[in-house]
Amino acid sequence: MSDTSPAPVSPPTRPRTRRASAPQLVLAALLAGVAVALVVLLDRAIQFEAQVFAHAIPAVLGASAVLGEHATLTIGAGGPLLFSMTVGLACSIVLLLVPFLLIAAALLSAGRISVLRALLAVAVGVVLLEAVNTARVVVIAAMTLDDGVSGFGWGHTLVGSVIVLAGLLLSTAGMLWIASRGRRGQAVTA
C-alpha cells in the first residue's frame, strides 16, 4: 500500500545577510570621517596638492615651479614664458575623493568588503587619482608653456578633463574590482 499523505513542507529559508564586523564598521567610520575632514579642511588639502604639483612640474618639464601664497604656482621663471596659476577646487581631486571614500565606507558598513580589501582599494584609488590629477596639471603647464593662454584653455578644459575623467573611471573600476575579488562562490556568513 502506498502512502498518499503529502510530504512535510519545510519553512522557507531566509537568505543569510551580511553583517559588518567591528573592524569593518570602525574603518567605515574612519573613511567617512576622512571624507568629512577633506571638506572641512579643503584649503589645506588644496595647498598640499599644490605642493605636489610644484615638485612634479620641474621633475617632468624641467621648468621652474614656485609655490606661493593661496596655492599659486609661478611657472617658467628664467624661460621664454612666465605665468602663474592658482590651484583651486577645480584643479584638485579633493571633491573626487569624498565620494570615493564614502563608497568604500558604504561597502564596509554593509559587510560587502573586507578591511584588507578596503584598505588596498582606497590606497590604490587615492594614489591613482592623485597621479592622474598631477599628470593633468603637468600637461596643462606644458601646454601653457608652449601656447600661452590658448594652451592653458585647451589644456584645462579639454585635455585635462579627459585625463581626469579617464582616471576617475579607472580608479572607480579598480576599487570595485578589488572589492569584488574572491566574493564569487564564497558562502555568506551571518
Image (spheres, helix red, strand yellow):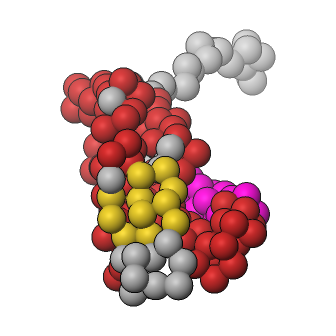
Q: Nearer the viewer, residue 107 or 100?
A: 100
The quarter in which the C terminus is drawn is top left
Q: Is residue 39 visible?
A: yes
Q: Nearer the viewer, residue 165 or 55?
A: 55
x and y, in percent, of residue 147 in the image = 69, 78
The quarter in which the N terminus is drawn is top right
Q: Main secondary structure of the magenta part?
A: helix
- Residue 25, relative to residue 99: is it above or below? above
x and y, in percent, of residue 110 in the image = 45, 28
Tell me which residue sits at (41%, 52%) in the image. Answer: 72
x and y, in percent, of residue 124 in the image = 38, 60
- Residue 100, relative to residue 23: is it above or below? below
What residue span does the magenta drawing correspond to? 157-172
x and y, in percent, of residue 38 in the image = 37, 33
Tell me which residue sits at (29%, 43%) in the image. Answer: 115
Residue 184 is covered by the magenta coloring: no
- Residue 109, relative to residue 99: is it above or below? above
Q: Nearer the viewer, residue 157 or 24?
A: 157
Q: Is residue 182 visible?
A: no
- Which quadrant holds residue 111? top left
Total of numbered circles in the picture?
Answer: 0
Tell me which residue sits at (53%, 51%) in the image. Answer: 91
Residue 162 is covered by the magenta coloring: yes
- Which quadrant holds residue 146? bottom right
- Which quadrant holds residue 74? bottom left
